[in-house]
C-alpha cells in the first residue's frame, strides 16, 4: 500500500469526508456538470474517488443516468445516503470490464496522488471508459503564482498541482482554467473533458 493510500485510509480520510458534508453545494455543482456534459450521449457514469457520492447525486438531479462510484475510504461509503451504487475499491485496480461506462468522472481525484502514480491511474481510468473522461481539479496556478504541491500543517503532501491535457495522450481534449465553475469554491479550478479516439475504443 502506498503512502497516499495509507493517508486516506487513516484519520485524514475521515476528516475530509466530514468536511465535504458542509462544503459541497449539490445544486450548484449540478449546474456545472450539466453545462459540461449534459448534451453528450452519456447514460452511464463512474466516479473515481466519489467520497459519499455528492457529485453523483448532482448528476441525478438533471439526467436519468446509471451512476456508480468507487472510493478507497470505507468510512465514506458506509456513511452515505446517496442513491447511486457506491463501492469500496482501489482506483489502480477498478473492478469493471473494459469500456463499462460512457463517462468517468475524476473530481478532486488525480491531485491527491504524486506524479509517479498518475500514468497508471490514467491508464486504468481510460480502460473502463467507453468514450469520455471528465477531470476537475485544482489548477497549477493560483492568481499567476505557480503551486506544485499543497501540504498539511504537519508537512505531509496532500494535493499535487498539474496540468491535465497531456495525461490522456490517446484522447482529444478541451477545457482549461475556470475560476467561475458553479459549486466549486476554490479560487482557481482546471477542468478537462477528454474523448477517446476511435482507434482506442
Image: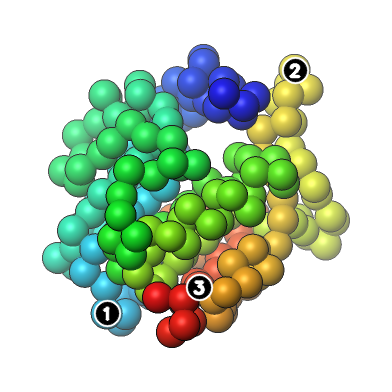
Mark whose residue sits in front, 2 or 1 = 1
- N-terminal of the pair, mark 2 or mark 1, is 1
**Residue 114 tag number:** none
Identify whether 45 is placed above or below 34. Answer: above
Q: Specify the quadrant that holds the N terminus.
A: top right
Disc 3 element: strand
> Residue 23 location in percent, x, y?
44, 39
Res 10 seen here: yes
Q: Residue furthest right?
A: 145
Left or right, 33 with reference to 162: left
> Where is residue 191, by image quadrant?
bottom right
> Where is residue 154, by image quadrant?
top right
Identify whether 158 is placed above or below 186. Answer: above
> Residue 16 location in percent, x, y?
49, 28
> Residue 169 location in percent, x, y?
62, 72
Identify whether 28 is placed above or below 70. Answer: below
The structure residue drawn at horizontal position 64% and vertical position 63%, both measured from the top left corner, is 167
> Residue 111 location in percent, x, y?
62, 46
Q: CA distance from mark 1 to mark 3?
A: 14 Å
Instruction: Please state which of residues 90 and 12 is positioned toward the viewer in this rendering.
Output: 90
Q: CA distance from mark 2 to mark 1?
A: 45 Å
Q: Specify the quadrant that holds the C terminus.
A: bottom left
Res 58 seen here: no
**Residue 41 tag number:** 1
Disc 2 element: loop
The residue indicated by pointer 3 is 194
Left or right, 68 with reference to 197: left
Mark whose residue sits in front, 3 or 2 = 3
**Residue 154 tag number:** 2
The structure residue drawn at horizontal position 37% and vertical position 35%, both measured from the top left corner, is 89
- N-terminal of the pair, mark 1 or mark 3, is 1
Amino acid at each position: 500500500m502506498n503512502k497516499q493510500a495509507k493517508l486516506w485510509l487513516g484519520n485524514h480520510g475521515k476528516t475530509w469526508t466530514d468536511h465535504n458534508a458542509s462544503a459541497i453545494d449539490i445544486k450548484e455543482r449540478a449546474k456545472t456538470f450539466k453545462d459540461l456534459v449534459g448534451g453528450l450521449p452519456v447514460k452511464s457514469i463512474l466516479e473515481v474517488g466519489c467520497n459519499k457520492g455528492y457529485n453523483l447525486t448532482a448528476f441525478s438531479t438533471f439526467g436519468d443516468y446509471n451512476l456508480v462510484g468507487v472510493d478507497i475510504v470505507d468510512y465514506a461509503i458506509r456513511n452515505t445516503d446517496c442513491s447511486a451504487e457506491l463501492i469500496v475499491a482501489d482506483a489502480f485496480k477498478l473492478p469493471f470490464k473494459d469500456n463499462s461506462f460512457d463517462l468517468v468522472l475524476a473530481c478532486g481525484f488525480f491531485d491527491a496522488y504524486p506524479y509517479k502514480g498518475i500514468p497508471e491511474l490514467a491508464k486504468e481510468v481510460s480502460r473502463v471508459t467507453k468514450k469520455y473522461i471528465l477531470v476537475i481539479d485544482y489548477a497549477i496556478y493560483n492568481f499567476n503564482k505557480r503551486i506544485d504541491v499543497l501540504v498539511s500543517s504537519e508537512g505531509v503532501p496532500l494535493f499535487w498541482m498539474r496540468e491535465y491535457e497531456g495525461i490522456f495522450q490517446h484522447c482529444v481534449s478541451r477545457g482549461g482554467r475556470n475560476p467561475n465553475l458553479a459549486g466549486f469554491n476554490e479560487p482557481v479550478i482546471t477542468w478537462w473533458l477528454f474523448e477517446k479516439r476511435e482507434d482506442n475504443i
